[in-house]
Image (cartoon, rainbow, N blue to C red):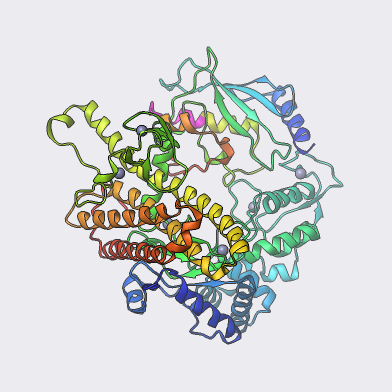
C-alpha cells in the first residue's frame, strides 16, 4: 500500500522523462523492477555496454531501501568496479540502512550508480570477491559492508 | 578436591556482586560505575588486580536491570543538580551526549543554548514547541502527495514530510530496527536527531513504550565499560574496565549470573586463551574454508587397521575398534599406545622442511595441511564437548534411576556434575588453544605452550574416558574421578596463566597482526 502509491508516482514520472542512459525495462508490479543503465561520459571501462539492475521493493518502500543488484544476461554483463561483486551485489552506502534516506527513489539510485561507474578507473572486483560470491547466502540488505572508501 | 582455586573463576566477582547488591543504595562517588569516564590504563589496572586472582582472570561486576535503572536515575539526579535542569530534560541531554557526563557538563557550561538546542530542548523549542502544520503548496518527498489538507512535520533542520510518512518512518526505526536515542531526520544526509518532544508528537502510546525500553538499553549500549550478557533472554549487564585497545594484551572472559561465560571484548562465548582478533580471523577462515575442512570433523572414520567404519559416540579420543580391538587416537589416527609417552606429539604440527616445500603447489598443500591440522583438533574438541555432554546427561539419568533403587544420595553423585562441567570448560579452552596455535610463530615459549596444551589434553581425555565406564562402576570411581577433575582444572589454570601472562607482556609472536 505504502510502496505501491509511491512507486505508481515514480513510474508515471519516469515515463515522462528520464536522464540519459537510464531506461525502464520492466515495471509491471510493485515488487520488482528492471532498469537498464549506461555510462554516458566516455569511460573506456564501460564503453558500449549496458547494465541491468534489478530493484526489489518491500511493502515499506521508500522508508526501507530497495534491494538493488546488477543482473547478468547474455548481453548485460556485471560492470567492473571495486565495490561491485561479480554476482552483482553492490556495496554502496546509499543502499545501506544507515545511508538510505526515504527521499531517494529509483531514478536517483540509477543516477548514483551511473556516477559511481563514471568516476571509476579500476578494472577490479572488491577484495575477497571469490569467497564472497561462493559463500554469501545473506540478502544484500543484511550484509554489513564497511564503507571504508567512499571516494571510489 | 585439593584445588578448588579458581575453577569457578567468577567466585570473587560473584561475592562482590552480592555485597554490591546489599549496599545498592549507598553507591557513592567511588563506586565502580563512577569510574567509567576515567581512563584506566592497563598498567594502572594491573596494580588493582588482587593477588588471589589468576593472571587470566579480570575484574568485573554483574548488574541486574533494577541496578542499571537505579544507576541511571542516580546519574540523572546528579547531573540535574549541576545543570539546574529538571530530571526529564537532563535525561534527554545525557542520552544525547551518549551518557558522557563530563563532556555534557563542559559543553553545557560553555554553550548552554547550543547544547540544549542540539538535543531538541532549545529556548525556541520551549516557546515554539514542535507542532504539526498544514503548508500551502507542499509536496511530500517520501510519498509524493500534495494534498493541501495534509498535516506535515519538520524539525529545526527544515526537512518537511507529511505526518503519515514521518510516522511510518519512526515506526520502522523503532519497531523494526530497534533504534531509539539516535534516530536521524529522514532527509537525505541530514544528521539531526529526532528529539523526544518531536517523537512524542508523532508516535502512538505503544510505540512510545517500546521507545522508552530501547532508551533504557542505550544506557548500557553507550558505555564502553558496560555490556549486555549475550545469552538468550538474559537481562543482566556486565561491567568491566578492559578497553578495546587493550584486547591484544588481554582476553577478558566474564561470567554472568545466568551462568554464561562470555568475552567482554567481543561478546562471543569464552575463547581464552585466544585474543579477540585471532578469534575473529579464525572463525572467518573456518567459514571460508568450510568446504575443504568439513569432512574432517565428520563423525565417522575408518579404523586405520581393519578399515571398518567407526562412529564416535563419546567425547573421548581414545578409540578401540569393535572389530579388531585396535586402539588408536581419533585426532591423529595414530596408535594410542604411543600417546602419553614423552614423545607424544598429537597436538603439535610438524613443519615439513626443505625439498618438500619447494614448489608453490607443495607450499599451498602444506599451508592447507597445516590449517587442517589445527582445524581438525579445534573441531574435534568442539564436537567432543557436545558428546561429553550427551554422555553425561545419559549418565545422570541413569544415576537418578540408580539413586531411586539403591538409595544413594544426591550429594554422592554431585562429583559427576563437577566432572562434566570441568570437561566442558577444559574442552572449550583446548578448542581455542588450537586456533591460538595456528597463528603462533615458533619462539622459545612455544614449546612450553605446547607442553601445557598436551598436558591438559591428556588430563581431559583421561577424565572423559571415565564417563564411558559402566554405571555400576561409577560409584566406586568417585575418588579417582574427583582427582582427575581437579587435575584437569589445575592444568587448565596453568595453561591459561601462562598464555595470559605472556600475552600481557607481549611475548608471543603471531604470524598475523593482532
Ligand atoms: Zn508523505
Ligand atoms: Zn533534517
Ligand atoms: Zn547472562
Ligand atoms: Zn573476545
Ligand atoms: Zn579395526
Ligand atoms: Zn593423537
Q: Nearest the camera: A101 or B312?
A: B312
Residue displayed at 26% across by 47% down: B339
Q: Nearest the camera: A148 or A22?
A: A148
Residue A124 is a magenta residue: yes
Q: Quadrant of ligand 6?
A: top left
Residue A16 is a magenta residue: no
Q: Nearest the camera: B403 or B224?
A: B403
Residue B349, relative to residue A21: is it above or below? Answer: below
Query: Which corner quadrant of the image does residue B483 belong to?
Result: bottom left
Percent position (x, y) of residue A96? 57, 42
- Quick one: quadrant of the N terminus of chain A? top right
Percent position (x, y) of residue B330? 36, 41
Residue A20, relative to residue B116: is it above or below? Answer: above
User: Does residue B262 appear anywhere in the picture?
Assistant: no
Residue range corresponding to the magenta coloring: A115-125
Percent position (x, y) of residue A113? 53, 31
Residue displayed at 60% across by 43% down: A100
Q: Is residue B366 left or right of residue B269?
A: left
User: Does residue B457 appear anywhere in the picture?
Assistant: yes
Amino acid at each position: 500500500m505504502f510502496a505501491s502509491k509511491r512507486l505508481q508516482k515514480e513510474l508515471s514520472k519516469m515515463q515522462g522523462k528520464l536522464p540519459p542512459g537510464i531506461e525502464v525495462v520492466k515495471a509491471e508490479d510493485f515488487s520488482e523492477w528492471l532498469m537498464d543503465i549506461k555510462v554516458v561520459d566516455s569511460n573506456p571501462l564501460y564503453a558500449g555496454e549496458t547494465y541491468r539492475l534489478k530493484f526489489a521493493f518491500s511493502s515499506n518502500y521508500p522508508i526501507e531501501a530497495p534491494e538493488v543488484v546488477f543482473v547478468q544476461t547474455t548481453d548485460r554483463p556485471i560492470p567492473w568496479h571495486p565495490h561491485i561483486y561479480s554476482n552483482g551485489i553492490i556495496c554502496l552506502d546509499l543502499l545501506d540502512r544507515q545511508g538510505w534516506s526515504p527521499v531517494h527513489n529509483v531514478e536517483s539510485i540509477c543516477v548514483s550508480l551511473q556516477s559511481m561507474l563514471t568516476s571509476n578507473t579500476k578494472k577490479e572486483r572488491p577484495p575477497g570477491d571469490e569467497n564472497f560470491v561462493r559463500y554469501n547466502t545473506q540478502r544484500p540488505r543484511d550484509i554489513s559492508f564497511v564503507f571504508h572508501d567512499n571516494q571510489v | 578436591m585439593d584445588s578448588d582455586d579458581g575453577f569457578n573463576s567468577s567466585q570473587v566477582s560473584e561475592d562482590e556482586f552480592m555485597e554490591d547488591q546489599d549496599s545498592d543504595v549507598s553507591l557513592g562517588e567511588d563506586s565502580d560505575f563512577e569510574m567509567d569516564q576515567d581512563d584506566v590504563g592497563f598498567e594502572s589496572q594491573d596494580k588493582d588486580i588482587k593477588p588471589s586472582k589468576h593472571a587470566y582472570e579480570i575484574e568485573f561486576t554483574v548488574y541486574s536491570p533494577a541496578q542499571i535503572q537505579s544507576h541511571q536515575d542516580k546519574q540523572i539526579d546528579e547531573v540535574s543538580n549541576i545543570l539546574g535542569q529538571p530530571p526529564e530534560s537532563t535525561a534527554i541531554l545525557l542520552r544525547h551526549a551518549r551518557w558522557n557526563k563530563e563532556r555534557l557538563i563542559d559543553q553545557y557550561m560553555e554553550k548552554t543554548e547550543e547544547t540544549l538546542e542540539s538535543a531538541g530542548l532549545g529556548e525556541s523549542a520551549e516557546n515554539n514547541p514542535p507542532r504539526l502544520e498544514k503548508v500551502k503548496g507542499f509536496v511530500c518527498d517520501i510519498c509524493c502527495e500534495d494534498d493541501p489538507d495534509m498535516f506535515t512535520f519538520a524539525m529545526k533542520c527544515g526537512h518537511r514530510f507529511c505526518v503519515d510518512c514521518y510516522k511510518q518512518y519512526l515506526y520502522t526505526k523503532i519497531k523494526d530496527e530497534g533504534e531509539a536515542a539516535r534516530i536521524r531526520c529522514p532527509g537525505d544526509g541530514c544528521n539531526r536527531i529526532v528529539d523526544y518532544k518531536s517523537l512524542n508528537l508523532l508516535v502512538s502510546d505503544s510505540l512510545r513504550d517500546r521507545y522508552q525500553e530501547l532508551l533504557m538499553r542505550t544506557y548500557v549500549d553507550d558505555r564502553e565499560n558496560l555490556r549486555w550478557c549475550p545469552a538468550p533472554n538474559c537481562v543482566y549487564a556486565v561491567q568491566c574496565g578492559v578497553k578495546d585497545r587493550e584486547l591484544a594484551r588481554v582476553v577478558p572472559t566474564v561470567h554472568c549470573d545466568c551462568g554464561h561465560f562470555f568475552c567482554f571484548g567481543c561478546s562471543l562465548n569464552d575463547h581464552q586463551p585466544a585474543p579477540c582478533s585471532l578469534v575473529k580471523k579464525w572463525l572467518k577462515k573456518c567459514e571460508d574454508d568450510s568446504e575443504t575442512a568439513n569432512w574432517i570433523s565428520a563423525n565417522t572414520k575408518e579404523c586405520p587397521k581393519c578399515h571398518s567404519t567407526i562412529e564416535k559416540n563419546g567425547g573421548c579420543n581414545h578409540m578401540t575398534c569393535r572389530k579388531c580391538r585396535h586402539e588408536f587416537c581419533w585426532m591423529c589416527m595414530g596408535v594410542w599406545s604411543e600417546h602419553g609417552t614423552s614423545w607424544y606429539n598429537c597436538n603439535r604440527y610438524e613443519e615439513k622442511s626443505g625439498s618438500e616445500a619447494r614448489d608453490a603447489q607443495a607450499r599451498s598443500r602444506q599451508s592447507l595441511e597445516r590449517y587442517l591440522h589445527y582445524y581438525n583438533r579445534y573441531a574435534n574438541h568442539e564436537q567432543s564437548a557436545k558428546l561429553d555432554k550427551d554422555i553425561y546427561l545419559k549418565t545422570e539419568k541413569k544415576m537418578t534411576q540408580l539413586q531411586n533403587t539403591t538409595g544413594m544420595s544426591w550429594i554422592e553423585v554431585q562429583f559427576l556434575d563437577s566432572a562434566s562441567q570441568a570437561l566442558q570448560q577444559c574442552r572449550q579452552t583446548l578448542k581455542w588453544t588450537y586456533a591460538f596455535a595456528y597463528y603462533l610463530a615458533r619462539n622459545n615459549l612455544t614449546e612450553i605452550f605446547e607442553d601445557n596444551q598436551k598436558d591438559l589434553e591428556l588430563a581431559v581425555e583421561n577424565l572423559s574416558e571415565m564417563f564411558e565406564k559402566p554405571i555400576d562402576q561409577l560409584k566406586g570411581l568417585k575418588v579417582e574421578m574427583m582427582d582427575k577433575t581437579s587435575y584437569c582444572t589445575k592444568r587448565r589454570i596453568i595453561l591459561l596463566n601462562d598464555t595470559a601472562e605472556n600475552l600481557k607482556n607481549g611475548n608471543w609472536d603471531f604470524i598475523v597482526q593482532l
